Image: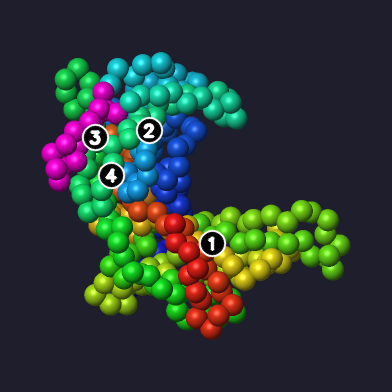
Amino acid sequence: MTTVPTSTTLSLLAASLMAVLMVGCDTTIDAVQPRDEYQFSMYGVLDVGRDTQWIRVEDLRDSLPLGARDDINATVMLTDETTGTSVELNDSIFTFASARDLRQHNFWTTLPIRGMHTYRIDVIREGDVRASATTSTPDPDYDYETINVTADSFDFVTSGIPMVAGARLDIELDAREDFGCSESPFTARLDIYASVTQTGDSEFTTPVDYVSFLDQPRYRCYRRADSLVTLHFTAAGSDWPELDAYNDLAFEDVVRPDSFSNVSGGHGYVAGVVRRTYTIDVTEENARILSVE
């Protein structure tokens, strides 16, 4: 099976991942087709191996122009459905000076998140569950290797888990004196939303083209500093939507805030994920993974 996302799908995935994997700044909601029954938005990840989990929860009926009010009058509960354990998340307010002092509620917990478990997040108001999201976490113990190395790219292969949620590629760059460049060396950080090919019953391949990124005009003054590249992969649980499910959707459906959502009673996305950082030497005939964190 090969999943080949269209440009529309990749744009949707990129926007969704930025919302899920990062704590966003903007709390305003502009739904193409708003629904009166939606009460809350919810974004975040349950990250296996991380010591603190963060879930952004906002009241969709809050029309304050500068973001959330002090108290959204809601309790957020996290339940491990695999074990039956529940915990109330702690509320906190973030204020972003760079975004016109927008405020948002980020609920957090230090409850350990386990691989291959199912979790549910409930937003409760006046004793009733007003919004809920359920997600599974992937198995953090999987095999990996790299194959098919060329001068420009390599294929990243995993066994047992598809790397479907994207990656970030870090490349160390040096200024090119022959171009008359005087800027300091820096690290180029580029998000990758590539197709994932299933090559066996439990084997998945993600192509990574690292040299072509340097052809972009903004990198004309730079060249790779050494043979090492760093990949930050995020793998989602088995309930992550199939990308090709969005290929046949009309544009007005794709841009709906609930088109890529697993929140009942609202919209947003909560994903169970495993993240890994790989340092890879790309000078070998077959690239070598030097370290995994």
Label 3: which residue? 78
Label 1: which residue? 230
Q: Residue furthest bottom?
A: 285
Tell us which disc is closer to us: 1 or 2: 1
Q: Within 10 Å of the Cα at label 2, are there few (<14), some (14-19), or many (20+) other Cα atoms?
A: many
How far is mark 3 from mark 2, CA to CA? 13 Å
Label 4: which residue? 113
Task: Tell me if 12 is positioned left or right of 127 in this view.
Answer: right
Label 2: which residue? 56
Mark 3 or 2 closer to N-term?
2
The residue stretch that appears in magenta: 75-89
How far is mark 4 from mark 2, CA to CA? 17 Å
Amino acid type for the residue under numbered disc 4 = Ile
How far is mark 1 from mark 3, CA to CA? 33 Å
Mark 1 or 2 closer to N-term?
2
Q: Nearest the camera: 144 or 148?
A: 144
In the rendered view, tell whether residue 250 sits above or below residue 179. Answer: above
How far is mark 3 from mark 4, CA to CA? 11 Å
How far is mark 4 from mark 1, CA to CA? 25 Å
Query: Does the magenta portion include 51?
Result: no
Label 1 SS: strand
Amino acid type for the residue under numbered disc 2 = Arg
Mark 4 or 2 closer to N-term?
2
User: Is the C-beta separation of discs 3 and 4 under 8 Å?
Assistant: no
Label 4 SS: loop
Q: Position of residue 286 (x, y in %)?
A: 50, 81
Residue at 60 percent across and 30 percent down: it is 98
